[in-house]
Image: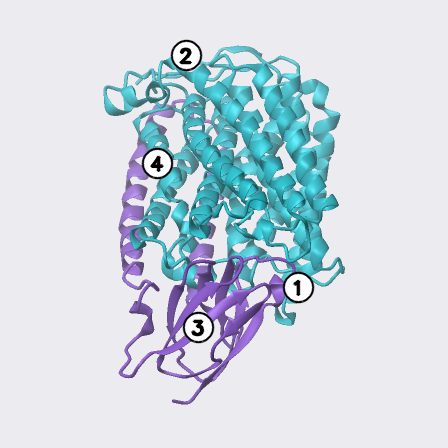
Chain colours: A purple, B cyan
């Protein structure tokens, strides 16, 4: 899952940074008075680090831009039609025109709000957030998602909307095609 | 290459007004931290405040922390910048007075009027209260933020005036002649460059914030004055992002000024440094759409720009400032006391927090992590372990009783405990984000409660350590006004 990958990458990079700070701290007690040669070496290393970052973050950034959730790109391969769910956020409930869809076939959620900003977050049975978009008054965000497996999914509100924000939950049943 | 020279001479103590601002900021900070702890305890089901109190505390915690960060950052900047340019103390005091008025307005609106619309006052929630609070409370809250903002606008206008009087233009104060032409070694010092950048971006951010606040106050009483929710969101996040980031850029001046004094090495405003700050000025202004990545109706190019600029932003933070800190500390013979340790850790906190932040700014990641606890995870890393730690380092620096310091065992213990518990606290937030736990929930699903319990324990330890910092600072305030002998900071020296 992307969540685990993100955690692993972040923890690793933060850990590497911590090691650098601990290493420098450990080597800080003795003084080298002639700073110029040290500085020269440090600048060379900085140039190397700069290009390492360019050649790691650059491709990563470009690669992730090839898989954007906007428009129909996220729906995946589909032979059949798109299942449409009209979703309206209210303080504090979700109004869906249907709550049952088929697995393996793309679903388009047309998400808007009747009052304030809400966040339309879809959680799987393991309570993992698998997709989301904002629900805004005056606008309709189209979120396309293909549920890979049948089961019961939950929609939680992901944008603070007032007193009962935390209890704005609705279930979606995903059934066999 | 020339070497740097240092002449021990009297270093100015802090002005009483600056100390008053820092004192107000850190006492408020401690109170807001207690509110934050209460929120985590509520989510951990250790206490039972109920949603009304939770969301009121959440609103106060957010607004209070942002305000406090602004005030403390401004005080740090003012203290050091006043060594290079002539600033108006009256304006500084006016900002402090307006801050206090704004805080009272916010407190009354939340505690008296039960306003709980969140510090981000996302339109139209403040005026869509479902009977929980009145329009008057919302207007008072937004008016309070407006008063706070006016104070900071005045302060930055004065800084702008002083910079232009001394350097002739923002371009010269940013070191553009040295950046784009021959580097004659006479670029403005890092403090001036940072203050110029902050002034430029914060004035733009504050004007955006003030404009939408006025629009929303008018809308509260004249609903016919319609506001587009997406426009409001853009203006709010532009303001919010710029303002909170500017607090770090103001506080980091303490690192630029203090670490060189400890290491006896210059923090040079060379071409790379100047390029980084000029780039950061642009990045801070154009990155804000990364807060709107889940607003699919936004122009796609803006959202892609948000991701791209997010990645670019890591370069100045990691390659220039964090690396620069490591460079001057390495084999410097630095004497580690609480001030230098906290400032060094703060550099780590800022850089470390930038990592989960730019990753969250990746659109495909944001799709499954936006508004989970990953978000407070990364901003607590670079604010609590970064910006606020810079302020704590500054507090210990200005209350040193002489070159030998004056830290006691309690200070060192508190500093050690703070660093470890703040790191654990922020990691617990990030780990909760990995588990998809939603943020800003008064009540969590049963599966999420164990995460909150762990986090609450670390939060309590952080609060205890910070209480020591605050009490020790207040107890040693008189020392902070004394001029003491310290090595001077080399300026404009080619090394």
Between label 3 and label 2, give the one nearer the viewer: 3
Q: Which residue is mark 4?
A: B282
Q: Chain of mark 1?
A: B
Q: Which residue is mark 3?
A: A86
Which numbered disc covers residue B331? none
Q: Position of residue A164 (x, y in %)?
A: 64, 63
Query: In the displayed structure, does residue B86 sit left or right of residue B492?
Result: right
Q: Which of these two is toward me, B209 or B340?
A: B209
Which of the marked residues, 1 or 4, is nearer the chain's N terminus? 4
Q: Is the residue B188 above or below the residue B352 in the image?
A: above
Which of the marked residues, 2 or 4, is nearer the chain's N terminus? 2
Q: Which residue is mark 2?
A: B166
Helix, strand or loop at label 4? It is helix
Q: Chain of mark 3?
A: A
Q: Chain of mark 2?
A: B
Q: Position of residue B298 (x, y in %)?
A: 36, 54
Q: Which residue is mark 1?
A: B443
Q: Position of residue B200 (x, y in %)?
A: 41, 28
Between label 1 and label 3, give the one nearer the viewer: 3
């Amino acid at each position: 899952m992307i969540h685990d990958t993100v955690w692993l990458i972040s923890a690793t990079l933060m850990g590497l940074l911590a090691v650098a700070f601990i290493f420098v701290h450990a080597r800080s007690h003795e003084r080298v008075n002639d700073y110029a040669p040290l500085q020269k070496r440090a600048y060379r290393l900085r140039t190397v680090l700069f290009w390492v970052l360019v050649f790691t973050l650059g491709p990563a950034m470009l690669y992730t831009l090839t898989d954007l959730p906007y428009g129909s790109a996220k729906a995946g391969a589909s032979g059949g039609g798109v299942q449409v769910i009209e979703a309206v956020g209210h303080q504090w409930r979700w109004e869906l025109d249907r709550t049952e869809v088929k697995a393996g076939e793309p679903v388009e959620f047309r998400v808007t709000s009747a009052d304030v900003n809400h966040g339309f977050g879809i959680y799987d049975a393991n309570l993992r957030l698998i997709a989301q978009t904002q629900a805004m008054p005056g606008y309709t965000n189209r979120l396309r998602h293909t549920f890979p497996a049948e089961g019961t999914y939950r929609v939680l509100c992901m944008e603070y909307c007032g007193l009962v924000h935390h209890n704005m939950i609705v279930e979606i049943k995903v059934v066999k095609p | 290459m020339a070497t740097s020279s240092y002449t021990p001479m009297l270093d100015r103590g802090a002005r009483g007004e600056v100390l008053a601002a820092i004192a107000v900021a850190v006492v408020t900070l401690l109170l807001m931290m207690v509110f934050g702890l209460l929120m985590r305890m509520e989510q951990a089901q250790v206490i039972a405040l109920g949603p009304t109190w939770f969301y009121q505390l959440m609103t106060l915690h957010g607004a209070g922390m942002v305000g406090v960060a602004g005030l403390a950052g401004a005080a740090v900047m003012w203290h050091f910048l006043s060594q290079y340019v002539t600033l108006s103390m009256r304006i500084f005091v006016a900002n402090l007075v307006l801050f206090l008025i704004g805080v009272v307005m916010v407190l009354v609106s939340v505690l008296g009027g039960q306003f709980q619309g969140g510090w981000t006052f996302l339109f139209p929630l403040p005026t869509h209260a479902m009977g929980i609070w009145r329009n008057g409370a919302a207007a008072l809250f937004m008016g309070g933020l407006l008063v706070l903002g006016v104070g900071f606008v005045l302060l930055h206008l004065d800084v702008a005036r002083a910079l232009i009087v001394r350097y002739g233009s923002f371009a010269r104060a940013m070191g553009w002649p040295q950046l784009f032409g021959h580097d004659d070694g006479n670029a403005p010092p890092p403090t001036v460059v940072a203050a110029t950048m902050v002034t430029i971006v914060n004035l733009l951010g504050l004007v955006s914030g003030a404009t939408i606040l006025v629009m929303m106050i008018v809308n509260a009483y004249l609903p016919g004055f319609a506001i587009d929710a997406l426009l409001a969101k853009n203006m709010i996040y532009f303001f919010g992002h710029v303002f909170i980031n500017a607090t770090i850029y103001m506080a980091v001046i303490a690192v630029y000024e203090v670490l060189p004094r400890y290491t006896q090495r210059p923090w040079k405003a060379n071409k790379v440094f100047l390029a980084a700050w000029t780039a950061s000025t642009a990045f801070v202004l154009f990155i804000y759409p990364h807060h709107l990545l889940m607003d699919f109706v936004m122009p796609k190019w803006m959202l892609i720009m948000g991701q791209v600029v997010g990645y670019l932003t890591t370069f100045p933070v990691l390659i220039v400032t964090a690396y620069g800190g490591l460079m001057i500390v390495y084999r410097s013979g630095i004497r580690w006391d609480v001030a230098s340790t906290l400032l060094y850790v703060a550099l780590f906190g800022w850089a470390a927090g930038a990592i989960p932040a730019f990753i969250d700014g990746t659109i495909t990641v944001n799709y499954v992590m936006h508004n989970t606890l990953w978000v407070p995870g990364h901003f607590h890393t670079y604010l609590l372990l970064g910006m606020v730690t810079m302020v704590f380092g500054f507090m210990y620096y200005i209350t040193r009783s002489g070159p030998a310091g004056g830290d006691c065992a309690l200070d060192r213990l508190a500093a050690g405990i703070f660093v470890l518990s703040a790191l654990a606290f922020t990691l617990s937030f990030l780990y909760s984000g990995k588990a998809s736990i939603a943020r800003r929930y008064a009540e969590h699903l049963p599966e999420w409660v164990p995460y909150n319990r762990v986090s609450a324990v670390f939060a309590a330890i952080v609060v205890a350590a910070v209480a020591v910092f605050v009490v020790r600072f207040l107890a040693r305030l008189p020392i902070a006004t004394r001029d003491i002998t310290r090595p001077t900071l080399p300026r404009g020296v080619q090394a």
